[in-house]
Image: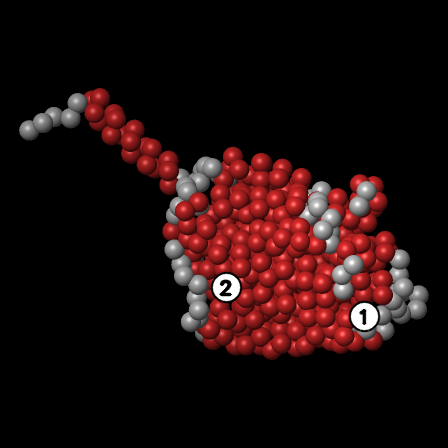
Amino acid sequence: MTRRTPRRSARRTARRGDDLARVRPVASPALVLAGVLLLSANLRTALAGYPPLLEIARTHLGISAGGAGLVQASAVMLMGVGSFLAPALAGPLGWERALGVSVGVLAAGSALRLVPALPSLIVGSMLVGFGIGTAGVLTAGVVKHHLASRAGTVTGGYVVSMMIGATVTSAVAVPLATALGGWSFSLAVWAVPAALAVAVWWPLARRFPRADDRGSAALPWRTGFAWLGTCFMGTTSLQFYGWLTWLSPYYQHLGWPTQHAALLQALWSVAQIPAALLFPALVERGGRDGRRWAFWSLLSVLCGVAGTAGALWLPLPPVIGPWVWVVLMAIGVGAGFPLGLTVIAWHFPDAASAGAASGMAMGFGYLLAGVGPLVMGVLVDLTGGFGVPLSLLLVACAVQALTIGLIRTRTTRTAA
């Protein structure tokens, strides 16, 4: 019988120690959260910077309202494509690396929009959209894997980070265009913080394995709950991107100066922040309760209905102006996105299935939302006003309310 030498035993012990080190956490949850928040701050800047400059770009390029809407629509529809492809892209790279690559693609798209021409504006916007779409799904998977115990609150946190980025961008888009010498410079400047965020995240992302089982789940085509989540996310996204694209042009159409309309959109962005933080946190206070989720979700929809109807039928109230309507519609869209991701994270048991369901929900949701700004722009051209286009957002609110009721029934039955 062969006896083990002390040296051989020591080598085997060291090898076992290396194996154990590979399965231990390679980064603290707090560090992952900080990186996710930094990346997320860039996931709306490229989209939010365009609407305040839409009329300026439209005049400079000589395009119709439908053509101007196509720019934003192309970005949002590519967000849908990116959402579908995100789990497959994460397989060979690892979710953390793939997240960094996605934000890098976003930065490249922003830089391309430096060229003040319609082709570069559309192609750059498509790259921006693809990067945002993949990053959104990958972020949901990273949160589920590293921060699952507080998924709702963390989701609200990174949505708030996105909204802060969007708020700053909306407020400074027009002054930046003036200071830098043109609207295209104002759009392209947001490539810089996105590239810096990737540079900070990448050393952390490299600590994680290139591939793991989070990329193995297929899209849940045959799961009824996944389709309900898709409908919820689609109607939320339609309202969000409809207002993101046309809120500022709508009030410019009513006679507001460009900078005032841009500040109105900035208020719309910043007013989403407390809703995105508070609503998911209030839902989680009662545990995973479908009825509590439905109550707060329906309340957010009612706020959106009130804000949209007010802006449509009494857009400029005396004394108070449109600010109340903007805050109400902001509560609706601000709470909707994190509430949708929260209920999906509750329903699916692991990061792989939750990431696949999130990819399906955001993919179809963004495709629907991408059509919205384009259709609204065409309707503006056809009708010469905003009454019919804005009515589409009220229809989206009604469908979302119906979906909430169906999700409540499904989650209550499952809990029982």
214 left or right of 43 in image: left
Amino acid type, mark 2: Met
Q: Given the current orientation, which residue lies at the most extreme right position? A: 319
- The foreground one among 349 and 171 is 171
What's the residue at 62%, 44% (across, down)? 107
324 left or right of 94 in image: right
What's the residue at 58%, 36% (across, down)? 200
Which color scheme did the rendering employ for the protein? secondary structure
- The foreground one among 364 and 273 is 364
Q: Which residue is mark 2?
A: 360
Asked if 5 appears above or below 243 in the picture, the reply is above
What's the residue at 44%, 45% (across, down)? 93
The CA span between labels 2 and 1 is 32 Å
- The foreground one among 271 and 44 is 44
List x then y, in percent, for residue 413. Answer: 47, 75
Which is more N-terminal, label 1 or label 2? 1
Asked if 4 appears above or below 394 in the picture, the reply is above
Q: Which residue is mark 1?
A: 311
- Which type of secondary structure does the marked residue at label 1 adopt? helix
Query: 10 Å neighbourhood of mark 1: few (<14), some, or many (≥20)?
Result: many
Q: Quadrant of the N terminus?
A: top left
Query: 10 Å neighbourhood of mark 2: few (<14), some, or many (≥20)?
Result: many
